[in-house]
Image (spheres, rainbow, N blue to C red):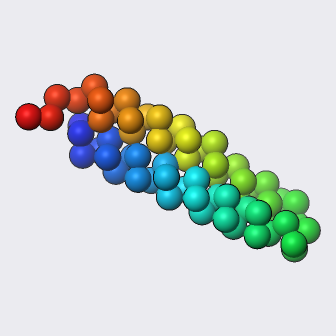
Amino acid sequence: MHRIGVITVWLGIISSIIGLIVGFASFSSGDEDTIGFWLSLVPVGFALLLLGTVMTQMSSKR
């Protein structure tokens, strides 16, 4: 459970960073569907980050 929590935390961090960078970089193209897709990864990343943190804290690592 601890390992899955750590992996989920990393996935959340990576998806948030990628969503922010690519989402704001795509503002120059003006395509609203692309901007919305990439920026929607940010809340998903935060949810994964929260889930991974809870899984890591609730597991009993010995």
Count how many numbered circles sit on residues in the image. Answer: 0
Q: Residue at x 17, y 29 (%)?
A: 60
Compared with residue 39, is residue 61 higher up or lower down, i.e. above or below? above
Q: Residue at x 67, y 58 (%)?
A: 20
Q: Quadrant of residue 62?
A: top left
Compared with residue 29, is residue 59 higher up or lower down, i.e. above or below? above
Q: Name, please, the residue furthest toward the left.
A: 62
Compared with residue 36, is residue 50 higher up or lower down, i.e. above or below? above
Residue 58's spot in the image, x, y percent? 28, 25
Name the side, left or right, on which 15 lies relative to 43: left
Quadrant assignment for the N terminus = top left
Q: Residue at x 67, y 65 (%)?
A: 21
Name the side, left or right, on which 54 lies relative to 22: left
Name the side, left or right, on which 26 lies relative to 57: right
Residue 33's spot in the image, x, y percent? 83, 59
Q: Residue at x 39, y 39 (%)?
A: 52
Name the side, left or right, on which 1 lies relative to 30: left
Compared with residue 44, is residue 21 higher up or lower down, i.e. above or below? below
Q: Name, please, the residue furthest toward the bottom.
A: 29
Residue 12's spot in the image, x, y percent? 49, 49
